[in-house]
Amino acid sequence: MSLEDVENIKKRIENFKKTLMELTETPPPGVDPSAEHKVREMSAEVVDSNPYSRLMALQRMGIVNNYQDIRKYTVVVVGVGGVGSVTAEMLTRCGIGKLILFDYDKVELANMNRLFYQPSQAGLSKVSAASMTLTRINPDVQIETYNTNITLTTQFEEFMNVLKTGGINGDRVDLVLSCVDNYEARMAINTACNELSLNWFESGVSENAVCGHIQYLVPGESACFSCAPPLVVASEIDEKTLKKDGVCAASLPTTMGVVAGLLVQNTLKKLLGFGTVSWYLGYNALTDFFPSMMIKPNPNCSDRFCIMRQEEFLNRVKTEPQCTNEELLEDKVIHEDNAWGILLADDDTTAVSNEATAEFVTTPKAENINKNTSIKSEEEYLSLNDGLEFAYPSADQTAPNEESLVKDTDLTVDELRAQMSLL
């Protein structure tokens, strides 16, 4: 080991000491270090000291009617990596009521190509480093962390319990955001949300770092993650065998930032009830292509809770009241089919009042009109009410002008051109 390596190790140790002191430093008894920065109520007052003035302006713009309600919601972010850490930061800056973070990994210097984390946080657990940063950004948000691997049977129950009781008032959480990078963790989230009938968002970025997606999953209404598994899983290939020693997947902070932005944008739309939530939204950075679709649930899904939620959804749809407002129903067609496929709606009132100008409307008085075509005769079509007259006479009523008539002649074309040149 060279002297340069020793110096680098010493610098890292000093950085660790500083971080440890910041984390373990305790305020005087009875004093909340962030209390002086907390804002009890969101205000739309436009002053430099109001951290929510720009957010509350959405109400003044007519985009959101109840932005202050964001403090009532609890969102769980599973996986605080490239997408999850930026997602957590965005939600914190938006003033979410409570944020619960799940991850079991540690911050590495290899993560510095991504957003959010800093070199001085290397070696810390991701949830601890994230909590420290997010609390400083917005102390109004309740941050709760779990250094937990939800794919383990012993820790999955803890995850389930948090989803059921982790809300602000001790009730179930409002939404789960999956920001993990493996199929096993996604399936754990899928199982928990299907069992609890809890809506959740799934997200991901491809290994080539230029594609990503988000997907909104509603148990019973849309396909769960078991309904349409990835091709690798459907081909019965072990996902773990795809990773090779010394080879890592590429990642771009730009692609992950875009996916995180789409994820949080749809989260806000879902929680605050504005705009349209995307069922599935993809992103291809090479062509800036954003495909969208909705995947229906698989009636033969392998998840028994998914099948139960599908039955509940179908029963709920059957019991929903039908629309009885006659004004919303389509006009009844009163004409017989014809060779041209023209169908006309009943509009007798318009036909009687505007009989002279209505071109394709039938009336009881128009007995001389062909029943199939409903086209008025030329004489009736050209008739006008009393007091009205045409601005110009029709061609049939125009008297011929003898000077305008073309007379027969035996002259050739060249002779006619010679005459025209003399004019």
Image (cartoon, helix red, strand yellow):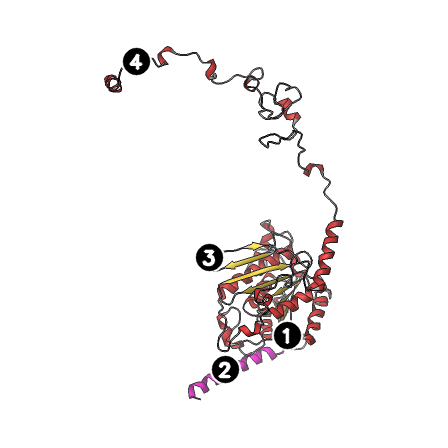
Pointer 4 with pointer 2, Cβ within 8 A = no
Q: Is residue 241 above or below residue 258?
A: below
Q: Which residue corresponds to mark 2?
A: 12
The one of 414 and 198 positioned closer to us in this rendering? 414
Callout 2 amino acid: Arg
Callout 4 amino acid: Thr
Callout 3 amino acid: Thr
Q: Is residue 8 magenta?
A: yes
Q: Which residue corresponds to mark 1?
A: 149
Circle 3 — which element? loop
Q: Which residue corresponds to mark 3?
A: 287
Q: Which residue corresponds to mark 4?
A: 409
In the rendered structure, which disc, 1 or 4, sits on the residue that comes first in sequence? Answer: 1
Q: Give the foreground label among 4 and 3.
A: 4
- Over which residues does the magenta segment extend? 1-28
Circle 1 — which element? loop
Quote the CA–CA distance across marks 1 and 4.
103 Å
Instruction: Give neighbour class at mark 1: few <14, some 14-19, many 20+ (Cα, 10 Å).
Output: some
Callout 1 amino acid: Asn
